[in-house]
Amino acid sequence: DPKIIQKPKYLVAVTGSEKILICEQYLGHNAMYWYRQSAKKPLEFMFSYSYQKLMDNQTASSRFQPQSSKKNHLDLQITALKPDDSATYFCASSQPGQPSNERLFFGHGTKLSVL
Amino acid sequence: GDSVTQTEGLVTVTEGLPVKLNCTYQTTYLTIAFFWYVQYLNEAPQVLLKSSTDNKRTEHQGFHATLHKSSSSFHLQKSSAQLSDSALYYCALSDIASSSFSKLVFGQGTSLSVVP
């Protein structure tokens, strides 16, 4: 069973619309992240949250807003969508402070296509 | 800034032959950890190898890598490629001195295709 659930798996949106990408993790981790994978670009760090607080933000645009309603949830709201936002968005989690667990666990991603 | 370079976008190798995926980096971090992530088709990326010790070989699932700080490299190798190794491989680095060690910097990725 997947331990990090991302919904939906595929998403098609029109330019200018707003979408929310859902992420839930059942690994008991305290830190959650969003990464983006655009065509022909490496996986790119977007946000990190720890205990539901924003720790780091590498996304220039305020159109991307993470939302954490519970410790194991980190959704991503994207407003005023643009075609350049088309990418696969990966949610990830980790448990900082435990050397044996110093790694990211990724969800399967949400593939967003903006027309 | 910090960066990871994977020079090959696609590597094709015949089953049973050795394979090497290159990874070099530039970083200002003093204490660093390196990872190789593998992403199989329609799957999530997952850790294959991890290392933070200079000149120490790390092995997993037949793959091995050695961090060489003198040459800023962390190449991935396998002596005998298998068809099931076909996947996308990412090299990544992280600063382990700060609390945000999981803010990984990824390379472009190398697609490995193992053919019969």
Image (cartoon, rainbow, N blue to C red):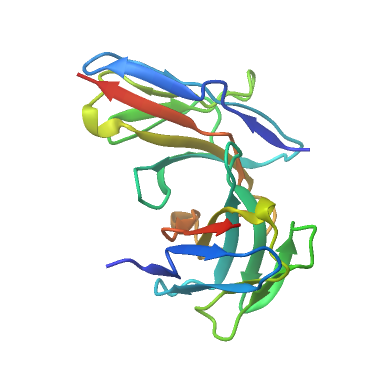
Please give left or right for residue A29 compared with residue A16 in the image.
left
Image x and y of residue B60, in percent: 32, 36
Q: Quadrant of the N terminus of chain A?
A: bottom left
Residue at x 41% of width, y 70% of height: A5
Quarter of the image that includes the C terminus of chain A: bottom right
Q: Residue at x 57, y 41 (%)?
A: A39
**Is residue A107 toward the left or the right of residue A69 in the image?**
left
Q: Residue at x 40, y 53 (%)?
A: B44
- Closer to the camera, A81 or A88? A81
In-front residue for pair B76/A85: A85
**Does residue B100 appear anywhere in the picture?**
no
Residue B27: x and y in percent read 72, 34
Find residue B71 and report its horizontal and vertical position in percent.
63, 18
The quarter of the picture where residue B32 lies is top right
- Tell me if residue A76 comes above or below residue B18 in the rendering: below
Q: Position of residue A23 (x, y in %)?
A: 49, 72
